[in-house]
Amino acid sequence: MHATFVEAGWAIAIIKLQRDDEVECLGLRVVVESPVFPCGAIVCPEAKRLGLLREIASQMSAEGSIAFSRVEGLVGRLGNIAQVVPAANTYMQALYRLEHVRLRVGRRLLQAAGRPATGAAGARAIRRRVRSVRVNANTPATADYIRSLSWWRHALERGIQVPLAVPASFPALAAPGSAAIFTDAARESGVSGGAWMALLQSDGSLLFLWCALPWPADIGQALRDNVLSMPAGELGMMVVAICVFRRAAVMRGHLISHLYCYTDSIATRATINHDGSPSPQLNHLAVALATRLEQDEDEDSGDEADVLPGLSEAGPGTEPLRMPPLQLLAVHIAGTGTSNRAADAFSRDGGARWLAELSGPVTTVRLPFPDWGLRLLREAALSPHRHA
């Protein structure tokens, strides 16, 4: 065991070792050979995987209240796995929210019941840990909890493993499989969201994909009233651009595995790079992005937006290529002025003047803003900016 750790480059406190003591696997397991990752992988032990599946199934089917300690235990064990599975972070926010639920109890009631009334001196009510909870109650918090458990169930059924050795850096933009998108959103009257992507064709010409849509009246007003936060508008545009542009690129023979996402929104960058957000609005959009990417990588989702008009130039009878797993890296464009002027142009005036500046052999394709993107923004607006 000592030799293995030394070979892997992991630090060991020799003085704390106990000879002949058995090492029990309480968390994750490291395998040197994996059929999926030749360089080795970190996997969830089979006993733990089956135990988690049993507990998830039990909670999802529970009709009455369950002990709150079961929620805490399950969230803790799933959080352990999420430390090495970045995609899981998107689905942890709902679990953490229910795990931290507390009841406000009057100090006098606690004193009358002979229970300790700890808390701020003079406070009339105290937040106390609950003893049981109905995880299938019809509330937003429990509904999100069950949806997150559903994702974990499917992930554990497939088997969780991540590569032991990963690239030390994101591939360069010029590397095969790499591309970039630029997005922006605005909320002034008569403006919209906009995005673009440029791809180099095999014949040396440029393929310029772009999208812009004046916000429907209700979404524009929600942004101006700050019911839908501006970061949510920015992230919503980013989510749509990632899914729509990626599919359009793949249908034209461009297999994209790594995507740089340029934005002038710090919150959007953080949500993309951290696979989730504590903000209910932003995390709703992050979950939607993860779900759609998984559908695209597993099989065609069947959504009406998957068939995009204007893409027949790929050739009659051409079948969409299988999409490889996509890794994202969001980059914040700091400053004002010309830093993000191209994306700004599409969100404010449809990009007409900027398109006119394109020179050389270039093919421009305007992609439609899908209906599911508008539904997604309306759904996000129903959630608060942050939890109370």
Image (cartoon, rainbow, N blue to C red):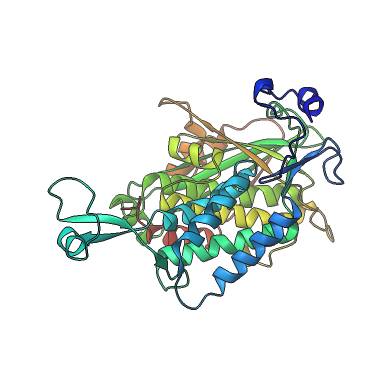
Side (left or right) of 68 relative to 110:
right
Foreground of the two, 388 or 188: 388
**Is the residue 312 above or below the residue 21 in the image?**
below
Is residue 311 visible to the viewer in this orientation of the structure?
no
Query: In the image, residue 232 lies at what x, y percent?
Result: 42, 48
> Taking 50 as reference, is 357 above or below it?
above
- The percent position of residue 287, horizontal first and vertical second, equals 54, 54
Total marks drawn? 0
Give the residue at the far bottom of this rendering: 63
Quadrant, the N terminus:
top right
Q: Is residue 312 left or right of residue 345?
A: right
Q: Residue at x 77, y 44 (%)?
A: 255
| Percent position of residue 222, x then y | 33, 56
At 42% from the left and 67% from the top, the residue drawn is 133
Q: Nearer the viewer, residue 177 or 129?
A: 129
| 131 is higher (above) or lower (below) than 1 | below
Image check: 290 left or right of 116?
Answer: right
Could you say which is closer to the camera, residue 43 or residue 214? 43
Residue at 54 percent across and 43 percent down: it is 195
Q: Residue at x 42, y 73 (%)?
A: 138
Question: Is residue 209 visible in the rendered structure shown here?
Answer: yes
Residue 231 position in % (x across, y down): 41, 44
Residue 384 to residue 346: above or below: below
Front residue of 345 and 264: 264
